[in-house]
Image (cartoon, helix red, strand yellow):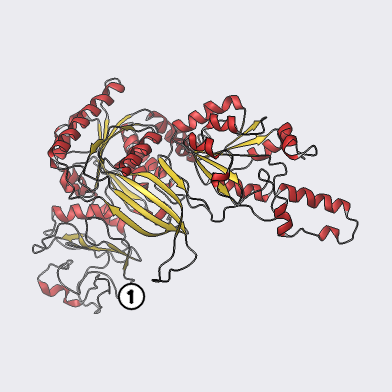
Amino acid sequence: MAGAAAEQRRLATVVESWLGRPVLIVGDAMLDEWRFADSDRLCREAPAPVLTLRRRISAAGGAANTAVNVATLGGRAVLVAPVGADVAGDELHDCLDRAGVWDRTVSQPGRPTPVKRRMLAGNQILLREDSGDPDDALDPDGVSRLLTALDCATEELRAAAGGEAPTLVVCDYGLGALPAPVRAWLVAQRERYATVALDAHDLADWRGLAPTVVTPSFAEATRLLARAGGASRPTGGTDLHLEHPDGDPTDGPSELTVGAAPGGTHTDSTAHTDGATHTDSAAQTDGTAPGFVRADAPGRAAGISADRPGPVGEPTASEGRVAFTGDGLSVTGTGVTVNTEAGAGVDRAVLAESRLAELHAHTGADVVAVTLDTEGAVVGGADGERRRSHSTPVPASHAVGAGDAYLAAMTLALAADAPLPTAAQLAQLAATITVSDTGTCVCLRDDLLAALDMRPVTGGHPALVGTDELDAIVAAHREAGRSVVFTNGCFDVLHRGHVRYLEQARALGDLLIVAVNSDGSVRRLKGPDRPVNPVEDRGALLAALSCVDHVVIFEEDSPAALIEAVRPDVYVKGGDYPPELVPEAPLVRRLGGQVRTLGYVPDRSTSAIIERIRSHSQDASPHATDREPDAASSQAQVSMSDASPGPRTHPTGAPPTGSSTTTRPS
């Protein structure tokens, strides 16, 4: 235990050391849009669900999300990227401002901001619409302004850091933000940056950059190896072989199969219905060396037995098709075949580790981190040091942007001169703790430290606070990029309905502040026989709930003054009515916040509980203790501040840091 605590302190020291470190992020910035809907029927025109939009969230994506993660992890992030002069661009600017990113993006009129729009129902992504075309190239003036912005941002960061060379992060996702002149400029200016991280769909476009670290996905690593060529490698043993057929005009991998290499007698097998193929004994008749299968030979692939499941998965952008078998042993796309004699026990991690030396040679990087989505990552240094990290499998909708968190933490750790094992561990931890819910992943510095058991999530402040402390506490949370949820009530007799209400309110943001009416305020609102419990007890019980971050007591009958002080991102109130009818709604909206109402739960209210207790004490009937009021009578006794409302539809996901949310009435 002592050793584990020492290790956590060592990791936390690295996190503390990168605070304020200057980082310039350049590349393809985009907007992530999440639309949460309900669906309880099919339309008559087609077997398609009818959707009712309930909530919309906008978040920074791509290079912009990497910048947000750098900022929320404690770095000083500056983003340089082309952004359209459109509504999506305006929303992206807002996301950057909320996260504390220095926005040095370059407006590109006539070139739309790339957007990924996802429609969800019941936490399931039903469809995704992408806008933004790689063919929308920057014009010469746009390139010139982008280069000027890069030069100025570099010097701005250097000056802010007292002459220290900044760190550079390049995010090239093939959307046209980094044309050849910009790539050439970055290569030529390499010496101006102490640490350089590269995340690119096509690493071959960045020869000469000599990055400190590259973080390709498994498919991106295979694409680079395919383009680099390797057909002449001899076969034998358990070696892994890669062939890029001479007659294939395409760039990029077509088939990557890990399993037994062909040879001798194989059982004939049929082609998968989705285009992936199985091996038969004819694989050796086309002139290929043993251990290879020509990717252009129909009906053939290597090393997969007929009883293995067919490929499943989403095609990777700019790669034709990439599909993984259910056992994770093959990937298909266009242009290359990799085989092994190691058998079915070989997986992607083994393959990636076996090719790290080649990836180092082809990228010129000191560190190569091949990310394996739900299987973690394989990381290698130029000196041969290897590290394997693991992650927890989650739904795909929870992992959007997790790679950005990984890249940001890895870059900051290496920039702070952390050893490779430490950097790899922190990067994997940052990615893992962001995938707890649907939405674009953002890792907060306090959450990373909390995962190391070095700091409570609330940043060290007590749960029960005074009004005079609230301003400083909220300011600290806002500086860390947290969205604030605020609610208020009497909470006289705490019950299950209250807990459910508060848990669902907490799910709407990163921080929940609960304002509790004082005893005098409750008497004025509820009558002389209330409250049942004094405010000291009510506040202490609320503060003990894990979903409540801070509790504050107020004397007034209205929480207006506290709302003015807190300026919540989301204000939550109980009631089966539209948010427009909430008395505080105009004030909250004037301050830039959103209003949510959570519907009542029948027979779950303080008034109903008190009435039930009184009924039991006054009724002399032997069966009196078994009597329960029906739902209708309980509903009639519910008061707005005491009722524990539950939403008609459970909110899916919390607005991530650096995001904005728009709510429709439930």
Relative to the observer, which residue lies in front, 399 or 516? 516
Quarter of image, res 349: bottom left
- Residue at horizontal 63 percent and vertical 38 percent from the top: 543
Residue 48 image position (x, y, % from top left): 40, 68
Residue 279 drawn above or below residue 426: below
- Residue at horizontal 37 percent and vertical 54 percent from the top: 118
How crowded pointer 1 is (Cα within 10 Å; few <14, some 14-19, many 20+) is rated as few
Relative to the observer, which residue lies in front, 661 or 279? 661
Residue 571 drawn above or below residue 333: above
Residue 315 image position (x, y, % from top left): 28, 60
Task: State left or right for residue 49 relative to residue 457.
Answer: left
Residue 366 image position (x, y, % from top left): 23, 39
Q: Is residue 28 visible?
A: yes
Residue 503 drawn above or below residue 396: above
Residue lying furthest bottom? 268
Identify the amino acid type marked 1. Asp
Residue 419 drawn above or below residue 61: above
Residue 624 image position (x, y, % from top left): 85, 59
Quarter of image, res 522: top right
Task: State left or right for residue 594 relative to residue 207.
Answer: right
Quarter of image, res 516: top right
Q: Which residue is mark 1?
A: 307
**Secondary element at image label 1:** loop
